[in-house]
Image (cartoon, rainbow, N blue to C red):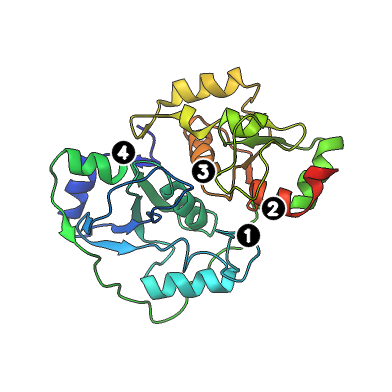
Amino acid sequence: MSDILISAHDLLDRLASDTPPKVLDASLPNSPIAAHVPEDDRKIPGSLEFDIEQVFSDREAAFPHTLPAKEALEAACQGLGLAPDDEIVIYDNRGVYSSPRAYWLLTQAGFKKVKLLDGGLPHWLSLSLPVQHGYSAPAPLSSRPVLQANESVVSVDEVYANISQQRFKLVDARSAERFSGAGPEPRPEFPSGHIPASFNLPFTEVLEDGHFKSREEIAALMRSKELEPSDHLTFSCGSGITACIVWVAAELAGYEHLALFDGSWTAWVMSGRHES
């Protein structure tokens, strides 16, 4: 298993240690965008709420789930008691869905010891492991942590310029139907389709039963899509969530030259470039 992932039983052992990791629940609420899941208050013991929509996004941005400014991210981490040298485990309530977004946010800000719970909360519950009801109270830091500026973000202008002069391969994590235009977008006001010269790797293809596939399977899949380890890859999706699933899959497979089109298809459509 890659050091990005931690198993449920290994996390259980770490929680019983003298220095347990900080456990972050990065679940998103039910919406038309993601598969519906039961909503209850069962959490992994010690869980803190990592609120992607309300706290760890720029609420003033034109697009949902936009990366917050470095100072805002520092303030959010201070409030949750997260320091860059902390051992952190992240999960979500869909197995693998929004937790990779939290992983991307923290690792690109300079956190060095971040893992994802393999299988997330559904797998934890399937093993009848201990739970608590509701979130634990955070212990805020006395001062803001000093974080790195996220240098992995690619702008809509860079994506547009890349069509004619390719510096990276743009990898779209949406479904094949949305990518081809044959299926609708979850947001009915948006057309489906894709950015010219992009590659389609639906995030569901790197997963199996709520877990990431093996690094060997992911590597073979990516090569079948003409994505080589030496390539510079930029990931996109609908609004920057599921693109991070494929980012983590690429890391698992040993790919190193990674970036994120944070605004993704939402930014592309709103820019009007899809009409040109």
Q: Residue at x 22, y 54 (%)?
A: 44
From the top left corner, tell me how far across and down residue 96 is, in percent: 39, 41
Q: Which residue is mark 2?
A: 267
Could you say which is closer to the camera, residue 243 or residue 275? 275
162 displayed left or right of 84: right
118 displayed left or right of 83: left
| Element on which disc 4 rests | loop
Disc 2 residue type (three-letter): Ala
Disc 3 residue type (three-letter): Thr
Tell whether label 1 touches label 4 (CB within 8 Å).
no
Q: Nearer the viewer, mark 4 or mark 3?
A: 3
Tell whether label 2 touches label 1 (CB within 8 Å).
yes
Q: Which residue is mark 1?
A: 63
> Could you give the CA–CA distance between mark 4 and mark 2, rounded to whole angstroms?
30 Å
| Residue 118 position (above or below residue 154) | above
- Quadrant where the image shows the N terminus: top left
Earlier in the chain: of badge 1 and badge 3, it is: 1
Disc 1 residue type (three-letter): Phe
From the top left corner, tell me how far across and down residue 208 is, in percent: 37, 28
